[in-house]
Image (cartoon, rainbow, N blue to C red):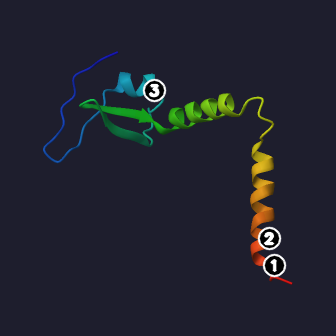
Amino acid sequence: MSSVARVSEGGKMNIPAHIRRAVGLEQGGPVLVSVVDGEIRMRVMRQLLADLQDEARVVFAGSGETVDDFLRDRREEANREDDPPA
């Protein structure tokens, strides 16, 4: 899906309604804007975070590592740092 849009001198751009609808931005929302190989790319943050979570599941699948384990380890580490040496 493509559409022509104009960027104002101040850097503002109106994204056509059919494109906003297609990516769930009817009411607006945060996007990541980056330059990749000379192209301006925009990604909806909600989708970017979902993609990162999917990638993390693949990386950690079968490792036995869990978020709960990680958080428990960080809490224990923080408690050790808070406790004065004996």
Q: Earlier in the sequence, mark 2 or mark 3?
A: 3
Q: Is residue 72 left or right of residue 47?
A: right
- Identify which residue, 19 or 85, lies in the foreground: 85
Farthest residue to the left: give it: 9
Dot 3 crowding, Cα within 10 Å, few <14, some 14–19, many 20+: few
Location of residue 75 by image quarter: bottom right
Q: Is residue 70 left or right of residue 3?
A: right
Measured as percent of width and height from the top left, residue 41 is found at 33, 32
Q: What residue do we see at 81% from left, 82% from top?
A: 85
Measured as percent of width and height from the top left, residue 73 is found at 78, 56
Q: Earlier in the sequence, mark 1 or mark 3?
A: 3
- Asked whether the residues under the numbered discs 1 and 2 touch, taking CB atoms below 8 Å apart as contact, a structural biologist would say yes
Farthest residue to the top: give it: 1
Mark nearest the camera among 1 and 3 is: 1
Number of callouts:
3
**Label 1, on which residue?**
83
SS under mark 3: loop
Q: Is residue 49 left or right of residue 77?
A: left
- Identify which residue, 14 or 60, lies in the foreground: 60
Question: CA–CA distance between discs 1 and 2?
Answer: 6 Å
Measured as percent of width and height from the top left, residue 24 is found at 48, 29
**Label 2, on which residue?**
79
**Label 3, on which residue?**
23
Please state which amino acid type lies under the numbered disc 3.
Val
Q: Considering only vertical position in the picture, is 1 above or below 44?
A: above
Q: Can you say which quadrant of the picture contains the N terminus? A: top left
Please state which amino acid type lies under the numbered disc 1.
Asp
